[in-house]
Amino acid sequence: MMGVPRFSWAKGESQFHVACKASGENQFCVGTESISVSVGQLIQRHGRTEMWDSVGVYAEEDRDGTLVVRVMVFNPEWEEALQIACVQSRPRDAGCLTAVGCNLDHITI
């Protein structure tokens, strides 16, 4: 299960933080300026088993300074990827009254 979200990062640290835990003792944690993570799973297709990257999480800073995290879903039967979530923040905009904006509209990309 997922843990409680972190919220104690000090100002001036990296724009994004990613933590990954896999079975056993395998784990990875880093602060960074952008993120590209894919999660693959075994699927059955055309009579054989193969690994398919079904979910992607991409984080970057837009030109206007907005930090954007996009969650994408991929299906081998679809022609285009599907964005299922877009989460935004504007940490350098003191006038922004929304800490985190979230758009859950499904958009083909």
Image: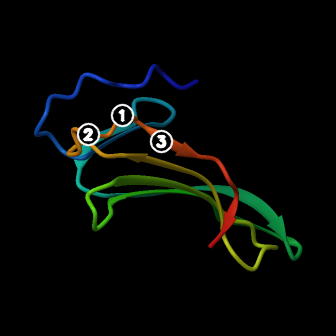
Q: Nearer the viewer, residue 23 or 102?
A: 102
- Residue occupying the point 42% across, 25% down: 5
Relative to 14, residue 53 above or below? below
**Residue furthest left in the image:** 12
User: CA gap, disc 1 to disc 3?
Assistant: 10 Å
Task: Give yes or no for contact between labels 2 and 1 (Cβ–Cβ under 8 Å).
Answer: yes
Q: Which residue is mark 1?
A: 97
Callout 1: 10 Å neighbours few (<14), some, many (20+)? few
Residue 37, given in percent of the width and then of the height, sits at 45, 56
Q: How far is the residue under mark 2 from the one under mark 1?
A: 6 Å
Q: Which residue is mark 2?
A: 95
At label 1, which amino acid type do we have? Answer: Leu
- For this view, does 50 lie left or right of residue 87? right
Looking at the image, residue 68 sits to the left or right of residue 94; the answer is right
Q: Is residue 109 left or right of residue 75?
A: left
- Three-letter residue code for mark 2: Gly
Secondary structure beneath label 3: strand
Q: Quadrant of residue 44?
A: bottom right
Looking at the image, tell me whether mark 3 or mark 2 is earlier in sequence order. Answer: 2
Front residue (pair 52, 3): 3
Location of residue 92 in the rendering, given as x and y in whole percent from the top left corner? 20, 45
Could you tell me the amino acid type at mark 3? Gly
Q: Is residue 49 above or below residue 11?
A: below
Q: Secondary structure at mark 1?
A: loop
Q: Which mark is residue 101?
A: 3
Expressed as whole percent of the image width and height from the top left, the position of residue 13 reads 14, 39
